[in-house]
Amino acid sequence: MFETKILGRDDKSVEYAAELLKRGEVVGIPTETVYGLGANAFDENAVRKIFEAKGRPADNPLIVHISELSQIEELVTEIPRLAISCAEKFWAGPLTMIMPKSPRIPMATSGGLDTVGIRMPSDETARKIISACGFPIAAPSANLSGSPSPTSAQHVFNDMNGRIPAIVDGGYCCVGVESTVISFEGRDGIRLLRPGFISVEDLKEVTENVLIDKGVLAMLDENAAVSSPGMKYKHYAPKAEITLIEGNSEQFRNFVKENGNDKTTLMIFEDSDSAGLDFSAVCYGKTSEEQAHKLFDVLRELDNMGAHQVYARCPAKNGVGLAVYNRLLRAAAFRVIKL
Ligand code: TXA
Ligand code: MG
């Protein structure tokens, strides 16, 4: 087996990464949200290599990343009015917008759909790589299918070593959860398909008419019609059995005292949540922003610790908290106990 190279983010490394991408290879690239597994969005064969490296079902579409607004024209047949307002307000940044795709995007990239998700990342290294390529980059999160999304080059290496030629190390991702994904309904409506750092509250500054898709908070039937294929797949599945415990710090401690055993690990906001308790514990932060930033690293840490059964304090559900809750809910296979 060959070893995947970890590159820096200097100009020479960016140039080398772009060379690989131009040759139809797959490269791990940093973004402000999570690391992506990038390839030329126009090149069917290159895109197939992404699905292979990840073990991703072929009907789950990829997000297409651009570095300049002008690139969008070639990718879509129509730009909804609200998409322009959203681009002005939130790009470059962690927002993906679904639009009707042009024939330039191969079906392999769009997972057979006639729409395409587009995003302009704010991460400087990502933008440099896209610009150096001269074509848009299709990229899902750079984890193996079913693993937590990677927020460091080391996470990508752990999942992808020997599967892709190189990873560009852009440091730890500042946001930490994947982009907000939206589609448009009629002239004035936005449908939220996946919550992220751009929150419902943020979107409401563009239109009051923001609908949260039922797949965001509910477990969907395997055969249900879904608005976004990613919703139906089991996601972010750590090895441990996680249960979300909804209640305040004191209620949480009492619950753990009564129900914990020698196999229990705690996933808490801060040390005081486990005061007086004798369990191993990991903290994932007090604010929603901090929790988003740390979440996937903590989920990987729980696996490394060999945690069997985890009681996690339930995050807030507003602002960025909704994104943290949405990811944790899936990691917990929708097990929630309300105290
Ligand atoms: O922050 C992010 O979005 C990261 C970085 C690398 O940009 N990418 C990412 O990609 O999270 P991925 O493939 O792991 O998640 C994309 C989600 C999937 O749930 C997919 O089903 C949905 O977006 N999606 C993509 N294109 C779509 C489309 N045309 N219609 C509906 N859903 C779409
Ligand atoms: Mg993903």
Image (tube, rainbow, N blue to C red):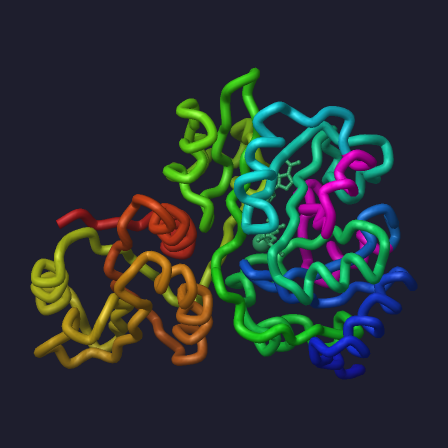
Q: Residue at x 54, y 44 (%)?
A: 90
Q: Is residue 57 magenta?
A: yes
User: Is residue 128 placed above or below 216 in the rendered structure?
Assistant: below
The residue under the point 77% across, 58% down is 130
**Corner quadrant of residue 213:** top left
Q: Is 303 situated left or right of 251 in this image?
A: right
Residue 203 in the figure: left or right of residue 137: left
Residue 106 in the image: state x and y as whole percent: 83, 39
Q: Does 200 appear in magenta?
A: no
Question: Where 144 falls versus 80 (above or below)?
Answer: below
Measuring from the top left, give residue 98's x and y in whole percent. 63, 34
> Which residue occupies the foreground of this view, 283 or 200?
200
Most foreground residue, 10 or 296: 10
Highlighted range, magenta: 46-75
Residue in the picture at 34% in, 50% down: 321
Q: Residue furthest right?
A: 23
Residue 142 seen from this side:
no
Q: Nearer the viewer, residue 305 or 155?
A: 155
Tell me where residue 80 appears, x and y as whole percent: 64, 24
Q: Considering only vertical position in the picture, is 137 above or below 231? A: below
